[in-house]
Amino acid sequence: MRLDLAAVGALKLCCLSVLLAGLMLPVLRRLGLRVFSMASDSYSSGTHSAAFVTCPNDTVAKELARYEWQGKIEEDSEVLLMIKTRSSTIPALAEYVRSKHPYEVAEVISLPIDQGNPPYLKWIGDIVPE
């Protein structure tokens, strides 16, 4: 049985298309998320990440903790407050923090708890109303 050259070429083209589609999928997904976020003026989950960084001392931490705000490099003594709550209460918590916080843009970032000490997680569920 002899394969037609056109059929072989079509098969190669099909394989190449599938390979390129697989390689381009992550790029196209990121691009789609960015376009959606810009067009809808809403946030798309997974666009940003929080990085936890350990430092040997306060001097190193202060050196790393500078940020740009309104065109200037800022260095503030900030305190990290970690609030554990139900995921369903995050929008209300963020609104409360914005209403009480002195910063024009308060940092409120929510990370889901994937695993933990079961009695502690049960305690959160017991004391935080839905």
Image (cartoon, helix red, strand yellow):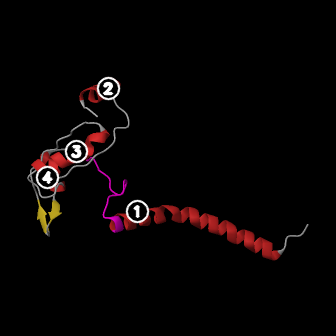
Count of numbered marks = 4
Q: Mark 1 points at which residue?
A: 33
Q: Name the residue under label 2.
A: 122
Q: Distance between the residues labelled 4 and 1?
A: 33 Å
Q: Residues within 10 Å of mark 2 (few under 14, many from 20)?
A: few
| Residue plotted at (15% across, 45% down) | 57
Q: Distance between the residues labelled 3 and 4?
A: 31 Å
Q: What residue type is labelled 1?
A: Leu
The answer to whether residue 55 of the structure is visible from this angle is no
Q: Nearer the viewer, mark 3 or mark 4?
A: 3
Q: What residue type is labelled 3?
A: Ala
Q: Which of marks 4 and 1 is in front?
A: 1
Q: Residues within 10 Å of mark 4 (few under 14, many from 20)?
A: some
Q: Mark 4 points at which residue?
A: 62
Q: Which of marks 2 and 3 is nearer the N terminus?
A: 3
* Quarter containing the N terminus: bottom right
Query: Residue 45 at what x, y percent from top left?
Result: 36, 53
